[in-house]
Amino acid sequence: MLVVDLHCAHGHHFEGWFASADDLASQKERGLLTCPVCGDHDVTRRPSAPHLNTSGLKERTPAVSRLPSAPASGLSASVPAPSTHVAATSDRSMHDSLPSEAQDAMAALQALYLKAVRHVVENTEDVGERFVEEVRSIHHGDAPERAIRGQASEEDKQSLREEGIDILSMPIPEGFKGPLQ
């Protein structure tokens, strides 16, 4: 089992579990490896410390102090929604150059964003590309009132706003569109 730290071009950090290094490479080549936050396919492996089993050593060597590393849990450290940031331009992500308090705040923001996305997905009906027609029907009383979600173009969203229909745009990562665990 290979557990690696990954990040996308938008600075979202997450963990991936693979059967082997070949499995990781294969999934990346086939376009299956995406960021669970923003769906970005530009995912790269971050350097991670190897695990060394030293329990069999007879003489103990002094412990080497460790540098702080990115959180190991899957969706805990990141930049907020994809529309609010710029892609990192170097191998060292923007996240790593921030003070630890800012990193903690960013991790908390991402956790809240993911909690909100989960709530929306669990408590709304996905009407897909019928969103504009369905929201108009609900607004005019032709369809039962209920919470819905779906896709709309920028022009359609503007048209709905001009008609007095309030909508909220929220990017939902691809991983949330299937069954939630």
Image (cartoon, rainbow, N blue to C red):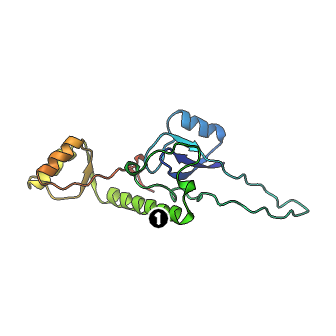
Q: Residues within 10 Å of mark 1 (few under 14, many from 20)?
A: some
- Which residue is situated farthest in the bottom direction here? 101
- Which residue is situated farthest in the right direction here? 58
Determine whether the residue tagged by mark 1 lies in a helix, strand or loop: helix
Residue 77 coordinates in the image, percent (x, y) = 52, 58
| Relative to 59, 87 lies left or right | left
Q: Residue at x 9, y 52 (%)?
A: 142
Q: Closest to the observer: 132 or 44?
A: 44
Q: Residue at x 45, y 59 (%)?
A: 110
- Residue type beneath disc 1: Ala
Which residue carries the number 1 mark? 108
| Relative to 63, 162 lies left or right | left
Q: Residue at x 17, y 48 (%)?
A: 134
Picture quadrant of residue 67: bottom right
Residue 100 coordinates in the image, percent (x, y) = 56, 64
- Reply above or below: 167 against 174: below
